[in-house]
């Protein structure tokens, strides 16, 4: 487990669902999320959020708590 905070980037509500980025084999989905951690986790999360802002109405960056794996 990393000693650094973890961040999740959440994006939903496409600005233009007809945009080609939402179609094809490697398309984005109407809801996207990704988790970052490590030394550069915060910087990576905010960079991804800026990318998502081009395509989605709602973009959020949040910290992630501890996950329990059983």
Image: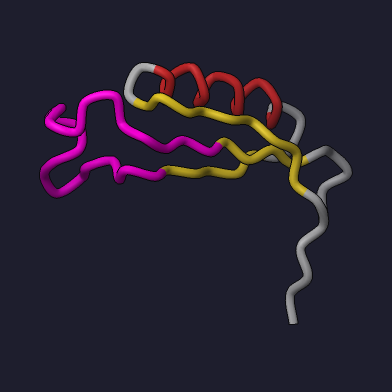
Closer-to-camera residue (40/69): 69
What residue range appears in magenta? 10-31
Looking at the image, residue 45 sits to the left or right of residue 69; the answer is: left
Q: Residue 61 is drawn in which quadrant? A: top right
Looking at the image, residue 17 sits to the left or right of residue 35; the answer is: left
Identify whether 57 is placed above or below 2. Answer: above
Q: Does residue 5 belong to the magenta stretch?
A: no
Q: How many marks?
A: 0
For the C terminus, the quadrant is bottom right
Residue located at (82% from left, 48% from top): 2
Residue located at (43% from left, 19% from top): 53
> Residue pushed farthest right?
3
Q: Residue 66 is drawn in which quadrant? A: bottom right
For the N terminus, the quadrant is bottom right
Residue located at (14% from left, 49% from top): 25
**Coordinates of residue 29 in the picture (x, y in percent):** 30, 45
**Coordinates of residue 67 in the picture (x, y in percent):** 76, 63
Identify whether 16 is placed above or below 8. Answer: above
Residue located at (11% from left, 44% from top): 24
Name the colour scheme.
secondary structure
**Coordinates of residue 36 in the picture (x, y in percent):** 63, 39
**Coordinates of residue 9 in the picture (x, y in percent):** 57, 36
Identify whether 9 is placed above or below 46. Answer: below
Q: Does residue 20 belong to the magenta stretch?
A: yes
Closer-to-camera residue (37/63): 63
Looking at the image, residue 27 sits to the left or right of residue 58; the answer is: left
Q: Residue 28 is drawn in which quadrant? A: top left
> Residue pushed farthest bottom?
70
Looking at the image, residue 21 sits to the left or right of residue 40; the answer is: left
């Amino acid at each position: 487990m990393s000693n650094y905070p973890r961040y999740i980037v959440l994006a939903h509500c496409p600005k233009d669902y007809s945009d080609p980025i939402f179609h094809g084999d490697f398309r984005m989905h109407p809801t996207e999320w990704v988790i970052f951690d490590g030394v550069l986790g915060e910087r990576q999360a905010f960079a991804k959020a800026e990318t998502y802002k081009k395509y989605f109405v709602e973009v959020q960056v949040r910290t992630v708590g501890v996950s329990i794996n059983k």
